[in-house]
Structures are given as structure tokens and as C-alpha cells.
Image (tube, rainbow, N blue to C red):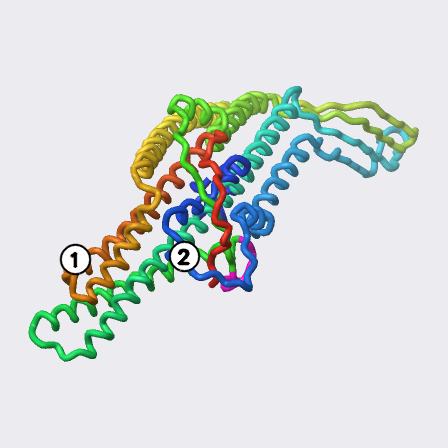
Amino acid sequence: MARALSAPGQRLNHSLVMNSPISHFLLFASLLGSAGCALAAEPNPSVTPVTLEALVAEVLASNPESQFYDAELAVARGEFRNAGTLANPELAIAAGRKRVASAIAQEGTAWSVSVRQSFDWPGRLALRKAIANRQIQLAEIGVAQFKVGLAARTRALALAVAAAQEQLAATREVAARFEALRDVLVQRDPAGLTPTLETRIIEATELTLQRRASEAAVTERSALFELNQLRGAAPAEPLRIERPSLLFPPAPPLEELVRAAREKNFELQARRVELEQQGFRVSLARNDRNGSFSVGPYVSREGAGDRETQFGIEATVPLPIWNRRHGDVAIAEARQRQAETVLLVAQRNLEREIAQHAASYGARVAEIARWRADSVTKFHEAAELADRHFRLGAVPIATYVELQKEYLEAVAVLLDTRRDALHAAQELHRLTGLAWHPSLTGGPGSGRGATP
């Protein structure tokens, strides 16, 4: 099952999140909590905004790749039906002539008909059904993991859209200041070296900011195009997403996270099922040494002279003399040891990932807790104030440029830290399946979103 489920959904594999509790995991929501409306992209009033969870539900319902995984589950169920079905009976017909040499030579027709039904050795059918049943479990785990990954990818793309919009709005705002300032400076007759150099600094900074704005716009559009692809829509179809806010609660203790992961993690569940399945394969390989037997009725008639008819039941059983299938048993036992090792390695890797993401989440939440709620707004106001006073000659150009850049850096740090915290929380939920998540606190309800 692992081979099939890795085919078309490679890009989703490791994004992996539960649908129900994490459904409140509005990844990008908190990005707008402190940035203020001055940083937001202009909404398109003709496009109806959608909530993130409505978007996730739409993607899960309409994503074309889900048909592949549904078909894989149907294949596993078909294999289970085949495993419990007996082989077709065999019909054997023979016809010929019979001659009896005696005082008077006689000959006539001879024919025989037999029907044989093959049966597996006792216990073999149950083992095959058990193996096929584990294959269904693997398929179901794979389908659930795919849907979790698809929902996680949808939320991650929404986060990328929101972060790019915030960065784009702030960069365009600062770039517009430099552009307006440059237009004023180039119209003046520079009297000396200092005004000329200041104009060049303004022009160079404007070019850099325009470049950063273009990169943010490309990032936003790329995420939007992929979102539309996931939901089965045209790449350029307009999309607006509502933006509520989130609080970041502390993560559960590491011991609780590890304990929950041992029970609910998708990969560990699959590895345990594979180990059970391999144990049944070992038993089946040992059972196969006895072969199968056939039983069925037969009837024959000979018509040379006297008419003679025979009927009865015949059975055939292979004699396990030359081939005891020791090699098949050894292979199955080796595969079982491999499955045990894979399970152990997967559990160790899982514990390490949980510890890493828990530490990352804790560090990001502690960093967020040190911010003031109006930090970005204060930087924004300071940038505007510096712009006004620079035009009046009260602020030197070095201070002006540095303050504008620091304002943009503050916005970027804010977005990156919240994004990292939400990503770590999402990964912890994917790995453990626990029902904790950043809690919804409501939002501005502005419906601002993306419109490609």
C-alpha cells in the first residue's frame, strides 16, 4: 500500500494534519491581528469571501487526486474478496476406443468425465483473508493520511497568501514613499554633493523595494494558483479568504505528546499493520509447504463387448518430498525482522520530530509573548512620522532610510514568527493527533483576501 499511495501525492506527503481539531487551525489568521488595516491588500468587493474551513472542505471534496486514493482502497477491498474465494473447479473429459483381444475380438467406445475442486490446506484461507484485511487497513490509513496532508497543504498555502499580502502591502507603502520623495528631489536643482548622494540613496532604495514587492506578488499569485488547482478551479479564479485571529496556547507536555503519537500517528499505525501482515505471511509460507488437495466425483464407461460403468470420488494430494519451500519461509521471516526494525526506527524518528517541533513551538510562542499588541502599528506610525519630518529637514537621510527598512523588517519578523509557530503546532498535531490547537478568538470580519 505504501508503494501505491506515494505515487501522485508526493508533494503532500509530510504535510500531514487531522481534520477535526485542526480544522480550527486557521494558520494565517493571526498574521493580521497586529499589523493593522493599513497593511492589508485591497479586497475585491465582487468576490464573496470564504472561511478557511470552507476552503479546506471544498478542497477535500473536489480535489481530483482523492479519486486515486479512493480507487486504491477499492483495490484493497477487491483483493480481500479474491482472498476468500475458492478456485474454480476443473472439468476433465477423456474419450477413446477400447479393444478387447480374446477368442472374439471386440472393441467399443471408452470415455470418462471427472470434476475436481481444489481446496487449500486448513488455515490457509483464513491467513490469506487476514493478510488482505490488513491491506484494507493500510489503504484506509493511507487515505486518511492523504486527506490530512491535503488539508494541511491548503492551510499552508493560505498562510503563504496572507504573509505575501502583508509583506506586499507594507513594501508597496514604503516604496510609494520613496517614489514620491524621489520625484520631488529630482525636480530640484541639487546644490552640492550631499543632495545628489541623498537622491541616489533614495533611488537605489526604491529599486530594492520594488523588487521585494514584485517577489511578494509572485509568491502570493503562486500560492493562489495552487490553491485553485487543489480545489479544482481555474488557476486565475478570484479567491478571498476571511481572516479571524488566534491565540497560541502552550503545547502539552512532551511525554503526553509522545504517548499520544504512539497510539494515533499514521506512520506508526501503518508500520504496526505491516508487521502484523508480515507475521501472517510467515504463517502462510509455512502452511504452503503442505500444498493444496483436490476432491471430486468421476464417472467412466467402456463399451467393448460388455458395457462397464464406473463412478466414485477421487482425491489428489501433492507429496512434499523434493520441495519443502524452506526458502519461502526464510524469506518471510527475514521480511518480518525487517518490518520490526522499520517500526522501531519510525518510532525513534517520530519521538525526535515531536521533541524538535515542541521546542520550536515553545520558542516561537515565547517570542510572540514578548511583543506588544501594537508593535507593528507603532513602527508604521514611526515610519510615517519620519517621512513627514525628513521632508521638513528635521530627520537625516540615514535615520529615514533605516527606519523605513526596520519597519519592513519588523513586519517580516512578525509574519515569519507566527508562521513558524503555526507550522510547528500543525506538525505536532499531525504527528500526535491530539486535539489541542491555537484557539479562535474572532476576527475583524473584513473578508480581506486575495484576488488574482
Q: Residue at x 44, y 46 (%)?
A: 29
Q: Residue at x 40, y 29 (%)?
A: 251
Q: Which residue is mark 1?
A: 399
Which mark is first along the chain, 1 or 2? 2
Which is nearer the eye, 308 or 255? 255
Dominant secondary-structure state across the stretch colored magenta: loop
Residue 297 covered by magenta stretch: no
Report crowding for label 2: few under 14, some 14 to 19, many 20 or more residues within 10 A (C-alpha): some
Q: Is residue 79 left or right of residue 431?
A: right
Q: Is residue 256 above or below residue 89?
A: above
Magenta highlight range: 231-238
Q: Percent x, y for residue 257? A: 42, 26
User: Could you tell me if the residues under marks 2 and 1 are in contact, i.e. CB atoms within 8 Å?
Assistant: no
Q: Which element type, helix, strand or loop, lies under badge 2?
A: loop
Q: Residue at x 23, y 74 (%)?
A: 184
Q: Which element type, helix, strand or loop, lies under badge 1?
A: helix
Q: Nearer the viewer, mark 2 or mark 1?
A: 1
Q: Is residue 160 left or right of residue 190?
A: right
> How many discs appear?
2
| CA gap, disc 2 and disc 1 | 26 Å
